[in-house]
Image: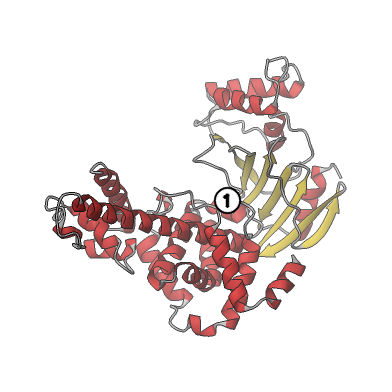
Amino acid sequence: MSDRKQNFEEMSTERLHELLRADFRSDAEDGLSGEELLEINRILSEREPESAEDMPSAAELWQRFERDYLPEYESGSLYADEEDAEPEPVPASKRGRRIRWRSGAVSRVASVLLVVLLLVGAGAVTAEAAGYGSWEAISRLAYGAFRWDGESAAQPPLREVLAAYDMTEPVAPAYIPEGYSLDWVNISQDAVRVNFYAKYENRDAEVLTVLVTCYFPDAAECPAPVTEGESYTAGGIEHRIVERAGRRSAAWVNGRYECSISGSISEAEMRAMIDSIYGE
Amino acid sequence: MNAEEKAFVEKLYIETAQLLLGYARRLLGDRDLAEEAVQDAFRVACSRADVLMASANPQGWMMNTVKNVSRNIVRSRARSAAFLARMQLGEKAYSEPQDIRDPDLLYENLKDDDDYLLLKRLSEPGATIASVAAELGIGVSACSKRIQRARKRLRKFF
């Protein structure tokens, strides 16, 4: 990325505009990344200060946002009848199916879920034995059998949820910083990937998240290595740690898994979480 | 959104809104539409605050969301323009002279139709959902839903 940033600096203003226009017109998934868009627009803003002359201040914009746009924000985009505006990779709520476990009272559905999870975890039921030859099929089975909108006292940890999907690669942390408890695990999928999104919260309503995206074995699209941030190696995998807006995030790629951890936690806690993935 | 998520979104907004606005203007070439793209992108951010906070690069996430919203704005306006153009073409099959350009003169039965007037207003240069909502005295979400219903209903005519 640093080479590409250097390239952007060396490009003419017109060339940068061309890149933005071409990227905007193209629906190709290998277009400019968010990071590259940021860099190009930063350069253009510096080179074209006059473009900001009649621009409202950020405070004015926020005021208008709170007055006109923030109410009813839960309905999402105003252009909802067009394409989904959320960038990829995302929990594809529109295209995929979603299940969620919540903490609360035990229900019959949760009991069924836990029994089957234990059976799968213990190896008593395998995909082949059940007549399902791939983990994709298992996920279809799970979606059908485990759809869960109720309340459960026993939220299965992320590792158990992944194991139920026959994913035993080391990607989920065993250690969670003190004070945080698992709120829910949200699963969604689209044509090329399955997202496992775990949300933890502490008493101060601070949120810690773990996102594991697994690309299908035959998916043409594969996760790209993360290059930004401080390097931290554990389990033979390079992790990149960055701090932004008071939150610390770690991102890494392990084979067909793309993973991240994000929360208001210390550097030591982040490293301990990463180490716990590999039993270190 | 809980308090932490709202604080996170507000901080990100203040830090990036002008950069995002500059990007949207480069894409859309219109100041009002660009602001709508940025505001709508932050609506998406609010509705997906948990995912945004989990992102390793929230500013990059917002850049991509602005790009996607801007594409939707272009598509939406193209659909409205195509709708009005179809009205003109439809009338040409029945009447002369053919140089009539005002859709009001073409479909007498629709010219006072609220849905038609709404789409026509929205297709005018610089018109945004927010500006139309303000004229109608309704919220932007309600206005967005009315526009979607109007398109669906009037599409039946063609």
Query: Is B73 positioned to the left or the right of B129 in the image?
Result: right
What color scheme is it?
A: secondary structure
Q: Position of residue A257 (x, y in %)?
A: 73, 43
Identify the image quadrant of residue A264: bottom right
The image quadrant where one finds the C terminus of chain A is top right
Q: Is residue A265 above or below residue A165?
A: below
Which residue lies under the disc numbered 1?
B51
Q: Is residue A91 left or right of residue A78?
A: right
Tag 1 subunit: B
Q: Nearer the viewer, residue A32 or A120?
A: A32
Note whether residue B34 is visible.
yes
| B7 is higher (above) or lower (below) than A103 | below
Count of numbered badges drawn on the protein? 1
Across and down, in percent, residue A107 comes to: 53, 24
**Percent from the top left, x then y, of residue A200?**
63, 46
User: Residue at position x 70%, y 77% from top?
Assistant: A10
The amino acid pointed to by label 1 is Val
Q: Quadrant of the N terminus of chain A?
A: bottom right
